[in-house]
Amino acid sequence: MHSIPRTPPTWRRYLRFWRPDPVADVDAELEFHLDSRIEELVQQGLSEPDARRAALREFGDYGSVRREVQMLEQSFERRRAMTERLGDLARDTRYALRSLGRSPGLAIVIVLTLSMGIGLNSTMFSVVNAYLFRPVKVPGADRLVVMGNTSPLMQQPHEIPYRDLQAYRELRNVFENLTGTVSYTESLDKGDRTERVWVEHTLGNYFTSLRPPMALGRVYTDESSARSERVMVVSYDFWSRRLGGDSSIIGRTLRISGGPRTVIGVTARGFHGFAPMLRSDGWSPMDESPAARRELMSSTDGDWFTTYGMLRPGVSLAQARAAVHERARQLQQQYPSTNKNVEPVVVPETRARPVITVASPVPLMAIVVLSLTLMVLVVACANVASLLLARGTTKYREHAVRAALGASRWRLTRQAMLETAILSVAGALGAAGLAWWSTSALGRIHLATDAPLYFDLTPDWRVFAFTLATALVTTVLAGLAPALRNASADPQTALVAGGRSGTDRMQQRLRSIIVVGQIAVSAIVVIVAGLFGRSMQAAEKMDLGFRTEKLLMAQFDLGLSGYDTTRARAFERELLTRVRVLPGVERAALASRVPLGYNNNAQRILTESLQRDNPDGELVFQNDVSPQYFATAGPSILRGREFAESDDATSPHVAVVNEVMARELWPNQDPIGKVIRVPGEKEELRVVGIARSSTYMMLGEAPRKFFWTARAQHRNMSPFLQVATSGPPEAIVPAVRRVVRDLDPNVPLFEVRSMTDHLRNGRAMFAIRLGALFGGSFALLALSLATVGLYGLVSYSVSHRTREIGIRIAVGATMRDVVGLVVRQGVTLALAGVVLGVVAALAVTHLMASLLYAVGSRDPLTFVFGPVVLGVVSVAASLLPAWKAAAMDPVRALRLD
Amino acid sequence: MLDVLQGTLEFLILRTLAWGPQHGFGIAKWIKTVTDGRLQIEDGALYPALHRMAQKKLVAAEWDVTESGRRARYYELTPLGREALGAQTTAWNDYVGAVQQIITASSRKPARSRA
C-alpha cells in the first residue's frame, strides 16, 4: 500500500500552543538575567541573599520593567497575528480569483444566476421598503401616527369628521399635535385655459404640526385658518413645472377655483404631502372662522379628514390608543346618533400606507412576496451549489493533495467559502444594478387614474443592507455544501482511487438532495403563484352586478369652467343628446360617481323604521345619476322604474334603492312609494324602483345598503359620462371628445377609459393583478432554475454512466430501455421534490387566505395543476440527456476512459 | 560617571551584538566591561530597549540554550540592524568630533578646522 498519511498529523494542531506566550517568555528572560547575575556574585563570595539584593539593585525597578516589556510583547504579538491573518486572506483571495479565472464561463453563469436571484430580492425589498419601512422626511417621523375611524357603515378604518378630530386634538398629554387634511381637485385659472390642480385643504395647524421641509416663504398657522385667509403653500414640483420656478412667486395671487389665493410658501423638493402615492400640488388652510367652526362642530356631514398625529416624545402607541379610546367612549355617549359604535384606530404612519383604509393587508402581502423571492433565491443558490459541486472533482483532488500536505481543514473550507463569497459579492453588484433599473421601471407602473400618483422606490440604505445580507445568506447557502464536501476530502481514497467511485457517489447524493429541495421550493412558488392567478381570474369573472364590458367613462367638471347650475344642466342635457346619436353608441347617462372609484359619498337618511332606533338617521352610500343610468351602466332594475326625464328639479324627488336596503328598511313590505327623509333637507325622497345589489366600493365586499337619487334634483358639478357601446368603447373616444369640444372647448375631460380598464388597472384589481404578475414571474423563474438544476444533474449522471449505458446497449438494451432508465432517475427526484413541495404548500398557504378572492387557499385545481406542470417540465428536462444517452455508440462508449 | 542619553543605549546594544548573538545578561555584562562601568545603566533598562529593537526588526530574538544548559533568549543583529549600526557609528563619530572640537576650541583660542 501507499504510505500517504490519511490526515494531517495531529501534532500539527498543537503547534499553535507553542507560539510565544509573551507573559511567560518575559518572565523567563528576566529571571535568567537575575539568576545569572546572582550566580556571578555568589562566585565572587557574596552570600546568596546578599547576591540577590545586589542583583535586584543593579537591575532597577523589576516590576515596572517586567510590565513594560510584557506590554510591548503583547501588542507586538497582536499585530503580528493580525498581519498574518491579513496575509492569509490576501493569499487566499488571490488563490480564489486564480481558481475562478480558470473556468470563466462557470463564474459568469454563477454570477448571472446570483445577480438575478439577489436582484429580484433587492427589487421587491425596495417596494416593501417604500410601503413599510422608509420613514417620511420630517423631524420625529418615528412618532408620526395616522388615525382613522371604524364604524358599522365601514369596517375599514377611514377618515375622521372635524368634530371628532377636534375632540382628539384635546388629548394634549399624548399628542404633541393632531391635524387633518382633505384632498380636493380645484381649477387653476391660467387666463387662456384652466388646469386641474390637487390641493389639500388642511386644518390651520397642518404645517406647524408636521413641519414638512420648506424651500421658500412661510407656512400658514391656526390663525390663518381662523381668519379664513385665502393663502396657499405650493409644492416644489408644481412651482417649478407649472408656475415657472421663479422665487418672486411668493406673495403672488393665483386664481384657484374662481377665487384669489396668495402663494406664501414653497415646500422643499421631494415633498408632495404625506400620502405616499398622491402628489399634491398645494395646501390651503380650510375655513375655521368662528361661524364655519360652529357649522363644522354641529354635524359630521361635511368633509372627513385624513388625520395625522405627532406623539409626544416618550408616549407609547398603547398609551395613545388608550387615551383615544377613552375619548371615543365619551364621544359615543355625547353623540349617540353619529358616534354609536364608532371606534378609532391609531397606527404608526408606516402602517397606514398607501392609505389607512387598505393598509392592513400590506404587511402580509409583503411577507408573502418576500418569501416567494427568497425561495427563488434559494432555488438559484441550489443551482450555484450544484455547479460548484460539479466542478468539484478536479477541485476535490487538489484539496486532497493540499490536505495531505498539511493544510488545515478550516483553511481549506475557508478558501472554498471565499470563492463563493467573491461570486456572491459580484452577484450582489450585478443585483444592485438590476434593482436600480427594475425599481425605476416598477415606479412607472401606474394605477389607471388621472390622479397625480407616484411611487418613489429609490433604494436607500435599508435596501443596501438587505442586499448585503442576502448576498451573505447566498454565500452560506451556495458555498457550504461544496466547501464541506471538499474539506472532508479523504486524501487516501481521493488520490489512490483517482477521485472516482466514492467521490462521485457522494457528489451524486448531495446534488440529488439539492435538486429535490429545489423542486420542492419551486413547487411552493408555483402553487402560491397559481393561487394568485386563480384569484385574479376569479376576480375578473366575478359578477359585480353592473355593466363592465363595452362601457366608456369620462369625467368632466363644469365647476372648473365657471358654470352655474342652470348652465351646467343645459350642457349636460345637450351632451347626452349628442352622444346618444353617435354611431356605435347604444345608450349614455351621467353619474356623480363610478363603482369601485376613488370617490364615495354617504348620505344621512331617515325612514320610519330607522327613526325608531336613531332619531338622527343612518349613513348610507349613495350616487346621483341621470335618466337611463341603470339601462346604460347600472345594475338592473328589479321592480318599479329608473329615473326619467320627468324627474326634474320641479317634480317630487325620487330615489331608487337596492335590494339590501329594501329588505332591511321595509321588511315584508313593498318599498315602492315609501318615503326617505334627508335630515336638513325640505324635500322627501320617494322610492320609485328597486335595483339589484351590486359591488360598490371593493371587490368581495359584503352586500350593503345603497341608493340613487336623480341628478336633476340635486347639485353636483363633476359627473362621469357613461356610454354603453356596441363595439370597443375606446373606439368612440375621439367622437365623444369632439362633441364636448363643440359644446365648449374649455371643458376638459378626465379619467377617459373603459370600465374594463378602470376595473383591471384601477383600484379594484390593481393589487391582485400585480400580485398575480409578480407571482407568475417568480414561478416562471423558479421553474426554469429548477429545470436547469435537474437537467444538469441528469446530464452529469449520464456522462458518468457512459460505460454502463454502453454495456447495456451492447448487450441489447433498446433505446426505450435507456431513455426509461435515465428519465426514471429524473422523474424520481422530481416526484420526491413535488410531493415535499405540495405538503409544505398545504401547510402554509392558509396564511395567505386573506389575500385571495373567491378562491380557497387549498384550491384543488391549483394544487393539481401546479405539480402537473412541474412534472411535465421535469420529464422534459430528463428527456434531453436521455436521448443523448440512447443515441450513443456503444463501441466508442466502451473504449472511453 | 555619565548618564546614558536616549538613543545611546540602542547604539550600545547594536555595537555589542556586532560581535555575535548574545542574551540580555551578556549584553549588560559586555557594556559594563568595555566601559569599565563608567556608563551608569540599570540592567533593567536594557530589556524594553531590546524588545523595541526586536519590533523594529533591528535585532532578531530566539530562544537557545546557554553553555551551562539554561534556556535563554538570544539576540542577533539583522541586516537592518547592521545597517543602523553603520549609520549610527558615523553619526556618533560626527557628534563626538563636534563635541571634541568645542572642547578644544574653548582651551586653545583660535578655532582649528577639523581635518
Image (tube, rainbow, N blue to C red):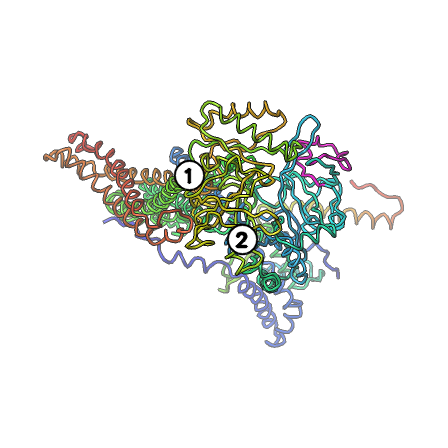
Please state the extent of the stretch shown in magenta in the rendering.
Answer: A232-256
- Of all chains, the one bearing label 2 is A
Looking at the image, is A441 positioned above or below residue A136? above
Which residue is the site of mark 1?
Answer: A773
Location of residue A357 in the rendering, given as x and y in whole percent from the top left corner: 53, 49
A602 inside magenta stretch: no
Q: Position of residue A805 (x, y in %)?
A: 17, 36
Given this view, does label 2 or label 1 mark the residue nearer the observer?
Answer: 2
Question: A354 or A456, which is in the foreground?
Answer: A354
Discs 2 and 1 carry the same chain letter: yes
Q: Are marks 2 and 1 in contact (CB under 8 Å)?
A: no
Compare residues A534 and A728 and report the one nearer the observer.
A728
Question: Is A251 colored magenta in this rendering?
Answer: yes
Residue A374: horizontal and vertical position, in percent? 42, 46
Q: What is the count of numbered marks?
A: 2
- Residue A514 in the figure: left or right of residue A298: left
Q: How crowded is mark 1: few (under 14 residues within 10 Å), some or many (20 or more)?
A: some
Residue A183 appears in view? yes
Q: Earlier in the sequence, mark 2 or mark 1?
A: 2
User: How many residues crowd mark 2 within 10 Å: few (<14), some (14–19), many (20+)?
Assistant: many
The quadrant in which residue A383 appears is top left
Kindly identify which chain the residue marked by label 1 belongs to.
A
Task: Kindly identify which residue carries mark 2.
Answer: A157
Percent position of residue A355, x then y: 55, 47
Element under disc 1: helix
Quadrant occupied by the C terminus of chain A: top left
| Horizontal side of residue A426 vs A38, given as left or right | left
What residue is drawn where x is 68% and y is 57%? A176
